[in-house]
Image (cartoon, helix red, strand yellow):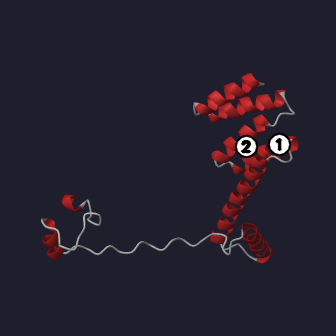
Amino acid sequence: MQDLLTDASKAADSGNKEQAVTLWKQSAAAFPSEKTPWTHIAQTRYEAGQYGDAIQAALEVLVRDPNDQLANSIIAISGLRLSTRALNDLSRQNSLSGSIKTESQDLAKLLRESLGETVLVPPPPPPPAAVPQRTARTAKKTKGTKSAGSSTASANPFDALK
């Protein structure tokens, strides 16, 4: 088993993820009670954004070790990402209604309570404050001289490039 795992790790490290997954699957078939190959497959699929496949591999890990935290995390996060995608698609198509909408709201409430948050997805941060435009008058004042009140710590180091 160690040889297969080593070969798979080398393939993954060299960027050949599909070959690595094939080798991990061979290892899993040869050593069916081992969770390690399935853990690698789940992690690789998760990192590739293939959340359905990641969930399936993580479930194989849990068959072998029901308390595996990584597998449970992959299942939870992958499931949330798949759900978010589907809900966004339904919302965009204005097809989120009836029992689906109610169930989605109930799940969002459960997630907020589990995470201890008042909002599930925080609003985007406010746009940065507008930087005042330099006028010809202020450009002349600052071009060659510093005003008496300015300090080197607050001076813009890019003023000399303007």
**Circles 2 and 1 in contact, beta carbons < 8 Å:** yes
Q: Residue at x 67, y 41 (%)?
A: 44
Residue 122 place in picture, x, y as percent = 60, 71
Q: Is 7 or 56 nearer to us in this picture?
A: 7
Give residue 91's quadrant in the image.
bottom right
* Above-or-below relation of 143 to 47: below
Give residue 10's quadrant in the image.
top right
Estimate how packed mark 1 is, as few (under 14), some (14 to 19) or many (20 or more) residues with alpha carbons within 10 Å: many
Quadrant of the image containing the C terminus = bottom left
Which residue is label 2 attached to?
A: 42
The amino acid pointed to by label 2 is Ala
Residue 141 place in picture, x, y as percent = 14, 72
Which residue is label 1 attached to?
A: 60
Q: Residue at x 74, y 68 (%)?
A: 111
Residue 12 place in picture, x, y as percent = 63, 33
Q: Residue at x 29, y 75 (%)?
A: 132
Quadrant of the image containing the N terminus = top right
Question: What residue occupies the far top of the structure in this picture?
Answer: 3
